[in-house]
Amino acid sequence: MREIDCSAVEELVRELCIKANLYLPQDMEACIECNAKAEQSPVGKNVFADIIDNMKTAREQTIPICQDTGMTVVFMEVGQEVHFTGGLVSDAVNRGVARGYTEGRLRCSIVSDPLERVNTGDNTPAVMHLKLTEGDKVKITVAPKGFGSENMSKLKMMTPSVTEEEIVDWVVSVCAEAGSNPCPPIVIGVGIGGDFEKCAYLAKKALCRSVSQRNPKKLYADLEAKMLEKINRLGIGPQGFGGTQTCLAVNIEQAPTHIAGLPVSVNVGCHVTRHAEGEI
């Protein structure tokens, strides 16, 4: 049994909150630069140039890459041989978020009640997902989620008789309806299977996967390719000004489901689909 003091969790979460909001993952930066070269619209090329300039400015001046520094989503993979000391892990995570957002001078966007709308002032509480794993390590992924893209996300409870083409077309229709709202070029996380809430979780988790990594099952990798091609045919383009590069990547995550259902969800990510990870 390995003991980990909750102060270590707090410190890592603090660090990851700041890092995720200032620096895009290297694979995301590379993907944006690659799509900028592929863009055929002159206006779209200019928009991509601004996006790339924004990435570099954020990195060089250590300022947020987007003014919407998001709702903090924290994924934790905890080895079963870990014993936490010094308080509750959930409290440590929220202390880390509070410090990361206030000390990092990041915008605090969370209200304590959805109808009363009073800002908590430190971007807490975080949305937390815990998964038990083997070993004595703790892996933490912090994924700030802006709501320009989150608001465009959808879930549909389909039936087992639905065809693969119908699934593809529905995902594409979600992107078409979203238009310029989620600040394209977008990243699309798709969840297939599970139940109502598991399906939404899968789509959010999919956005934390590298945009250069395809689903290991050929069936789903092929669906990712079909969705990406059809979304880019929409012509929405960078920031909605028209063009050939509307979507940077489609990531699908799947899970077992009930014989009577086939849930499908889409979590839309903007061109600054952010996450940072670390290990204790």
Image (cartoon, rainbow, N blue to C red):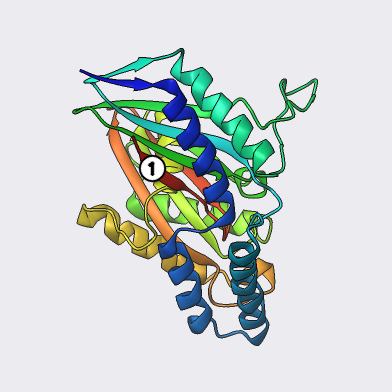
Determine whether 189 is above or below 28 in the image: above
Q: Is residue 214 left or right of residue 166?
A: left
Residue under label 1, please give it: 278
Q: Look at the image and tell me in which quarter the N terminus lies.
A: top left
Q: In the figure, residue 101 lies in which quadrant?
A: top right
Kindly tell me whether residue 113 is visible in this rendering. Answer: yes
The picture places residue 159, in percent across and down from the top left corner, at 38, 35
Q: Residue at x 69, y 48 (%)?
A: 68
The picture places residue 235, in percent across and down from the top left corner, at 59, 73
Q: Look at the image and tell me in which quarter the C terminus lies.
A: top left
The picture places residue 6, in percent across and down from the top left corner, at 43, 21
230 or 86, nearer to the observer: 86
108 or 249, nearer to the observer: 108
Kindly tell me whether residue 258 is visible in this rendering. Answer: no
| 10 Å crowding of disc 1: few (<14), some (14-19), many (20+) | few
Q: Is residue 50 left or right of residue 3?
A: right
Mark 1 residue type: Gly
Determine whether 272 is above or below 234 in the image: above
Determine whether 225 is above or below 8 in the image: below
Q: Residue at x 65, y 63 (%)?
A: 61
Q: Residue at x 60, y 77 (%)?
A: 243
Find numbered disc 1 in the image and state the secondary structure of the residue it sits on: strand
Q: Is residue 165 left or right of residue 269?
A: left
